[in-house]
Image (cartoon, grey):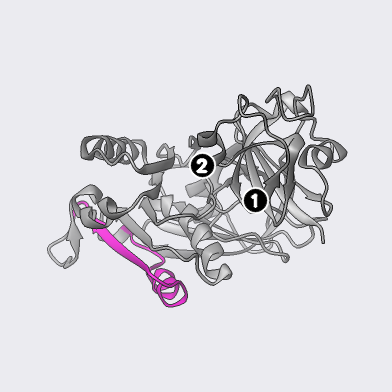
Amino acid sequence: MNHKVAFSFADGKTVFFEIKPNELLLDAALRNGVNLPLDCREGVCGTCQGRCESGAYTQEYVDDETLSADDLAQRKMLSCQTRVQSDASFYFDFDSTLCAAGGTQRVSARVTEVTHVSETTAILHLDASTHARRIDFLPGQYARIEVPDTGVSRSYSFANRPNDANQLQFLIRLLPEGVMSDYLRERCAPGQTVSFEAPLGAFYLREIERPIVMVAGGTGLSAFLGMLDEIAQRGGCGHPVRLYYGVTHARDLCELERLGAYAARIDDFSYEIVVMKPSPEWQGKTGLIPEHFDRRFLEANPFDMYLCGPPPMVEAIKQWLADAHLSSCRLFYEKFADSNTQQAIA
């Protein structure tokens, strides 16, 4: 049985290909035109080194001066000695251009609907079923969408998991003025064609080996909707999942029914909503997200934290983690500007 493999690179590009049963990972990559750097092919030089982000694999010979016991515990691997046992994803700390791996697809899709899910937020629904192949991406990654008739592109996280029908969603903040915002408000209609490039970004769901804390600021929720779709599809992950969703005003809140549905489908999943500038009518949590972190939960076990939102939020939480001395936290984050032009930083 063939398995699907994803290679992600430091420049945010990702390539997908199939690997044959018992085939060496390096051989499969080369067969599919991904020319990883290599030298000895004997598990000694370390040139083809990467890290397994998700999936099961075995390694044959690895020289202990090339990868230490700590390296192996961190799932570092040598492509020339690795055989995968399931669908898997791997990260390489160099640009995709180094191995002639283009990675992204150019896709034309049809607008099926624009759903206004709050006063300040819309979901753009796209149908890319006419595309020649399945649009693969890792939950949390994004697409660069061309705004029709403008020559301008904006980047948005996928708000759902990949699917064979290529039905896609993007959660988009509606700014008072903005190229995409104006298009969605004034000109977008079902049947129109929208083009995009994907997949992009180094922010995505890794192998779930311990509790997860997700922190979403505004439309940063979009990336987590894709991740939670994936976890729900798997039937859970065997670890607690906590989501903190923060917005400036209560009118910015969206997809609350969807979050409630995840709570019913994913064991030990819960979420907290925090409004920074509440109206007198707001009865929920207020202020800044870190003020509401469950310290006992965070201190109980090592955990992975995923952050997606505006730069001030991301930087504030990074500083909070440093001040709290939570050294057992593995941090993955993506921050974006007001235009929602996202920078993949993990």
Vertical placement of 302 versus 38: above or below? below
Task: Assign a secondary structure to mark 1.
Answer: loop
Seen in the image, is 340 located left or right of residue 34? left
Q: Which mark is residue 179?
A: 2
Q: Of marks 2 and 1, which one's residue comes earlier in the chain?
A: 1
Observer-nearest of 343 and 332: 332
Q: Can residue 151 be seen in this view?
A: no
- Closer to viewer: mark 2 or mark 1: 1
Q: Do the residues labelled 2 and 1 touch (CB within 8 Å)?
A: no
The answer to whether residue 267 is magenta is yes
Q: Is residue 313 visible?
A: yes
Seen in the image, is 310 located left or right of residue 289? right
Could you tell me which residue is drawn at 54 percent across and 35 percent down? 69
Instruction: Write the start and end of the magenta stretch as one range.
Output: 252-277
Seen in the image, is 326 located left or right of residue 258? left
Residue lying farthest to the left in this orientation: 280
Marks 2/1: CA–CA distance: 25 Å
The answer to whether residue 88 is magenta is no
Q: Name the residue under label 1.
A: 137
Could you tell me which residue is drawn at 25 percent across and 55 percent down? 249
From the top left corner, tell me how far across and down residue 277 is, in percent. 19, 52
Task: Assign a secondary structure to mark 2.
Answer: helix
The quadrant of the picture occupied by the N terminus is bottom right
Circle 1: residue type:
Phe
Observer-nearest of 218 and 73: 73
